[in-house]
Amino acid sequence: MNRLPILFAGTVLMASAFASCKGDETTWDTYREWREANNSCLDEQAARTEEGSSDLYFTRVVPPYDQGSYVLMHWFNDRSLTAGNLKPYYTSTVHVKYIGRFYNGTAFDSSYLQTDSIFETKLSSVVSGWQIALQNMHVGDSCEVVIPYQSAYGSTGYSSVPPYSNLVFHMKLKDIPDWETP
């Protein structure tokens, strides 16, 4: 008699494990075309060159704390003019203006939709791609940032962002309020 509840619980656990594995496979299959288009676009952006030059348009930025992650960044401003400005830490609160788009140019989010058009957040509260990008910016820098899906919302997506979405942001670091030295 005591074995029946254990047998039932084991069966339920095995069924849920099987269903969750099947769900991942379904997501992989469901988003195959989207994933392939995103990855193709990411490869194109990584190989993109400056107009009229053989220099790469984007710089591949790899954080020292995670050699497997990266973002592609292109600065619109002269970085020598902002080099002496503040730079955020992982624990910093930042003010950012941004617009986020999918690989195909469709906008999915923007600080410009907010009343004051400034987005305030702790760096530790955003996707790792934003953390990497912002820690490589100084106040006043304006960049285009391409974030691979692994450093964004991964294989699950979030809200209006589908799984396997590489994200493209135009962002400007406006301020680091209450900046402190570590």
Image (cartoon, helix red, strand yellow):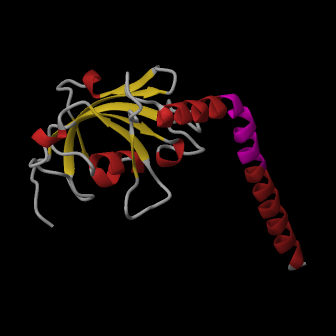
Q: Main secondary structure of the magenta part?
A: helix
Provide residue 7's location: percent of width, then percent of height: 87, 71
Instruction: Judge left or right: residue 91 versus residue 37.
Output: left
For the residue pair 67 and 80, the one nearer the viewer reads as: 80
Residue in the picture at 35% in, 45% down: 130
Asked if residue 127 is positioned above or below residue 118 in the image, the reply reads below
- Report the quarter where the C terminus lies: bottom left
Provide residue 59's location: percent of width, then percent of height: 37, 42
Residue in the picture at 46% in, 34% down: 167
- Report the quarter where the N terminus lies: bottom right
Instruction: Judge left or right: residue 128 versus residue 156.
Output: left
Residue in the picture at 48% in, 37% down: 46
- Residues rendered magenta in the picture: 22-33
Provide residue 142's location: percent of width, then percent of height: 23, 33
Would residue 89 be counted in the magenta stretch?
no
Determine if residue 159 is in view. no
Figure quadrant of residue 66: bottom left
Instruction: Judge left or right: residue 146 versus residue 114.
Output: right
Marks counted in the figure total 0
For the residue pair 64 and 157, the one nearer the viewer reads as: 64
Provide residue 135's location: percent of width, then percent of height: 27, 52
Determine if residue 153 is in view. yes
Instruction: Judge left or right: residue 179 versus residue 30.
Output: left
